[in-house]
Image: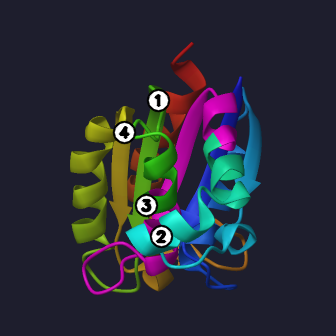
């Protein structure tokens, strides 16, 4: 079983990347490949760019990573209540190649932020839209107040109840086969 995981952020010290890495430690029954959106930097999508460039190789490679996986784990950074530009851009390019971007893959969707809502707005949008792009959302969870609830030295959630909810959400990618 192979899982593709990534943070929907390009920030080098992304708290969503930290959350993804912690989640990956819990996926003991799977081979996990963590992708970095910095490795898939593309021109901003537009119809004009698509006519000029066709479908960029990096977008094809990203889409192939999803296709070759058995499941997908994403932790969403929230920028002004929505997706980060980096995620939205790679998603837009991929959707022009294959509208069913998530290719019937089981998914666990996460988010976190320093604030008390934990990226809940972007997570809600992702959960709601995933089925339209052939994603099968098995679980989702928002982690509020990241710096209060996550031990950045130990790289683990230190809030016991949240940690149990987190483990339960992530475990859905250990059970789907």
| In-front residue for pair 25/149 | 25
Q: How many residues crowd mark 3 within 10 Å: few (<14), some (14–19), many (20+)?
A: some
Q: Residue at x 49, y 84 (%)?
A: 147
The numbered disc on residue 139 is: 4
Rendered location of residue 4, percent (x, y): 66, 43
User: Is 166 part of what is drawn in magenta?
Assistant: no
**Where is mark 2, residue-wise?**
89
- The image shows residue 133, relative to residue 110, as above or below, that is above
| Element on which disc 4 rests | strand
Mark 4 or mark 2, which has the lower sequence index? 2
Mark 1 or mark 4, which has the lower sequence index? 1
**Where is mark 1, residue-wise?**
106
Q: Residue furthest top?
A: 177
Asked if residue 160 can be seen in this view, the reply is no
In space, the residues marked 4 and 2 are separated at their CA atoms by 24 Å
**Where is mark 3, residue-wise?**
92
Left or right: 71 in relation to 137: right
Quarter of the image with the C terminus in it: top right
In space, the residues marked 3 and 1 are separated at their CA atoms by 20 Å
Rendered location of residue 170, percent (x, y): 51, 41
* Labelled pair 3, 2 in contact (Cβ < 8 Å): yes
Q: Which residues are magenta?
A: 64-91
| Element on which disc 2 rests | helix
**Mark 2 or 1: the one toward you:** 2
- The image shows residue 15, relative to residue 32, as above or below, that is below
């Amino acid at each position: 079983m192979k899982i593709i995981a990534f943070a929907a952020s390009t920030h080098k010290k992304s708290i969503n990347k930290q959350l993804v890495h912690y989640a990956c430690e819990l996926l003991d029954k799977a081979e996990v490949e963590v992708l970095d959106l910095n490795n898939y930097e593309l021109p901003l999508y537009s119809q004009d760019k698509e006519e000029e460039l066709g479908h960029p190789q990096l977008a094809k490679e990203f889409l192939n990573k999803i296709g070759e996986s058995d499941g997908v784990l994403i932790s969403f950074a929230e920028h002004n209540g929505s997706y980060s530009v980096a995620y939205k851009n790679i998603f837009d390019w991929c959707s022009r190649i294959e509208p069913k971007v998530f290719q019937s893959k089981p998914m666990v969707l996460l988010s976190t932020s320093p604030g008390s809502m934990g990226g809940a707005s972007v997570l809600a949008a992702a959960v709601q839209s995933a089925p339209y792009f052939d994603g099968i959302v098995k679980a989702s969870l928002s982690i509020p107040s990241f710096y209060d609830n996550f031990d950045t030295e130990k790289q683990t959630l230190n809030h016991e109840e949240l940690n149990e909810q987190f483990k339960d959400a992530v475990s859905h990618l250990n059970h789907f086969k």
